[in-house]
Amino acid sequence: MDLTFVILVEMLYAVASLILISAGLAVVFGMMKVINLAHGEFMMMGGYATITAVNLGVNIFVAMLIVAPLVVGLIGLVVERLVIRHLYGRLVDTMLATWGLSLFFIGMVTLIFGNTTTGISTPIPGFTVGNYQVNGYNFFIILVSIALLIVMLAVLKATRAGLIARGTMQRSDMAAALGYSPDRIYMATFFCGSAIAGLAGAVLAPLVGLVPTSGGAYIAKAFITVIAGGPSLIAGLISSSTLFGLVSQFFTFAISPVIGEVALLVAAVVLLRLLPQGVTGKFFKGKL
C-alpha cells in the first residue's frame, strides 16, 4: 500500500512537471504558431529571478508565483516588440532568431551570475510513508499545475480577452475588421506565454541546480509534449503530458531513470507516427 501511494505521487508529479514545462510553449506555439527555441532559456531566467528575489529577502512563494512570471513576462514583451513581431508567418526565420536569442540569454546570464551551479532549497519538507521517503514539494508542483490549467481554461473560454485572443489567432483579419488590434493581441499573448514559462522555471528551480545552460534540459520535452498534444491547447497538453508522464515513470520505476527518459522519446516517436496530427487531431476534436 505504501509503495502504491509513492508510485501514484511520483506519476502525478511527472505529469504535472510536463504540464508546467510545456504550458508556456503551448500558448506561444499552439496559439501563435511561433517556434520559440528560447523557451528553455525563459524557464532558466525564471529560476534565476526566483533565486535573486529570495536572496534579496523576498518570500520564496512570492518570488516563484509573482516575481519570476512578471520578470520573464516583461523580458518576453521586449523580445516580442523588438524581434518576434517582425517574423510572424516566417517559421524558419523565427527558429533562427529565437535560437540566436537563446544563445544571447545564456551569454548574458553567464556574464551576470557566472557559470557555477546555484539554487535554493525546497520550502516544503519531505515526509515518510512506511519505508519510503516522499518529497513534499512534489505536491506543491502538482497543485500549481492544476491551478495553472484551471486559470488557462477559464481565461480562454470564459473571458472576453480569451475569446478575442483565440479569434485573432484563427482570423486576424476578421479581428482587425471588428476593431481589435492583432498586433497588441499577439504582444499580450506572447507576454502570457513567457510569464508561464518563467513560472515553470521558478517552481522547478528548488529541485535542480541552476546553470546558464539549464534551459536545454527542458526544450525537447516541451516541444515533444506540445506537438504530440495536437491542435487543442488544454486537452492536448493534458493528454500528451499524462501519456508521456506515465510512460516515463513506469520505466523509471521498472528499470532506471535513464530508460524512463528514453521510453518517453520512443513513446513520442510512436505516437506521432500513428497520429501525425497529435492526440487531439484524432481525438477530442473541437475541444479547447
Image (tube, rainbow, N blue to C red):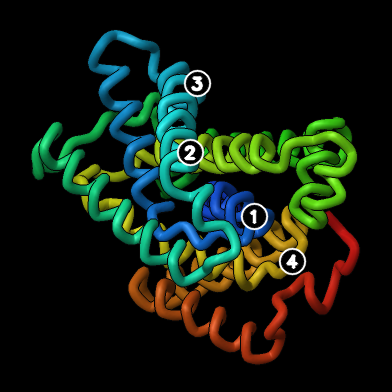
Using the image as rendered, state which of residue 51 and residue 25 is in the foreground: 25
Q: The residue under label 1 is which amino acid type?
A: Met
Mark toward the start of the polypeptide (4 vs 3): 3
On residue 66, the disc is: 3
Distance between the Cα atoms at labels 4 and 3? 29 Å
Of discs 2 and 4, which sits in the foreground? 2
On residue 81, the disc is: 2
Mark toward the start of the polypeptide (3 vs 1): 1
Q: Quadrant of the C terminus?
A: bottom right
Callout 2: 10 Å neighbours few (<14), some, many (20+)? Answer: some
Callout 1: 10 Å neighbours few (<14), some, many (20+)? Answer: many
- For image coordinates 68% across by 85% down, the residue present is 276
Counting from the top left corner in percent of width and height, residue 102 is at: 31, 53
Q: Quadrant of residue 171 in the image?
A: bottom right
Q: The residue under label 3 is which amino acid type?
A: Ile
- For image coordinates 82% across by 39% down, the residue present is 164
Of discs 1 and 4, which sits in the foreground? 1
Mark toward the start of the polypeptide (1 vs 2): 1
Distance between the Cα atoms at labels 3 and 1? 24 Å
Q: The residue under label 4 is which amino acid type?
A: Pro
- The local secondary structure at tag 4 comes to loop
Of discs 3 and 1, which sits in the foreground? 1
Mark toward the start of the polypeptide (1 vs 4): 1
- For image coordinates 48% across by 32% down, the residue present is 73
Using the image as rendered, state which of residue 77 and residue 41 is in the foreground: 77
- The local secondary structure at tag 3 comes to helix
Callout 3: 10 Å neighbours few (<14), some, many (20+)? Answer: some
Q: Provide the residue designation for mark 1.
A: 32
Counting from the top left corner in percent of width and height, residue 9 is at: 56, 50
